[in-house]
Image (cartoon, rainbow, N blue to C red):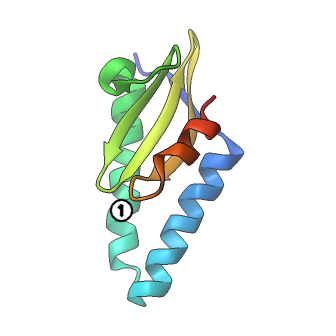
Amino acid sequence: MAKQVIWSQRAQTDRKEILAYWKKRNRSSIYIKKLNKLFNEAVQLIAEHPRIGKETNKDQVRVKVVRDYLLIYEETERHIGILTVWDSRQDPKRLDKIIE
């Protein structure tokens, strides 16, 4: 049975900013629709199989790769919390501060 997925405010903002960036850059919504679909499919997979993501140094926090992005999520007994959507081309030291 799939767990409930709860997007943090930060993750929602990250996702919106990523999609807005690509819409502005490409001047088309075709790619953002594909990317958004990939995000949704990954989240559904995580909900059904929470341990599918790669483990991190922090207990219960895992990472699922979606193209150049990392879905950082935390599994609890009742739900999955999406913590952030991270562009993997950024400085990884900044990510460490976010998931501490």
Question: Where is residue 45 drawn, in percent x and y?
Answer: 33, 33
Which residue, as the protein is rendered here, is positioned at the far right? 9
Q: Is mark 1 on a helix, strand or loop?
A: helix
Residue receiving disc 1? 35
Which one is nearer the viewer's eye here, 52 or 43?
A: 52
Hey, which quadrant is residue 77 in on the image? top right
Amino acid type of the residue that numbered disc 1 sits on in the rendered structure: Leu
Which one is nearer the viewer's eye here, 83 or 77?
A: 83
Q: In this view of the protein, can residue 7 be seen by the observer?
A: no
- At 39% from the left and 21% from the top, the residue drawn is 50
Is 47 on the left or on the right of 82, as rendered? left
- At 32% from the left and 43% from the top, the residue drawn is 65
- At 44% from the left and 76% from the top, the residue drawn is 22
Q: In this view of the protein, can residue 48 be seen by the observer?
A: yes
As drawn, 14 above or below 97: below
- At 33% from the left and 56% from the top, the residue drawn is 68
Total marks shown come to: 1
Question: Where is residue 81 drawn, in percent x and y?
Answer: 58, 30
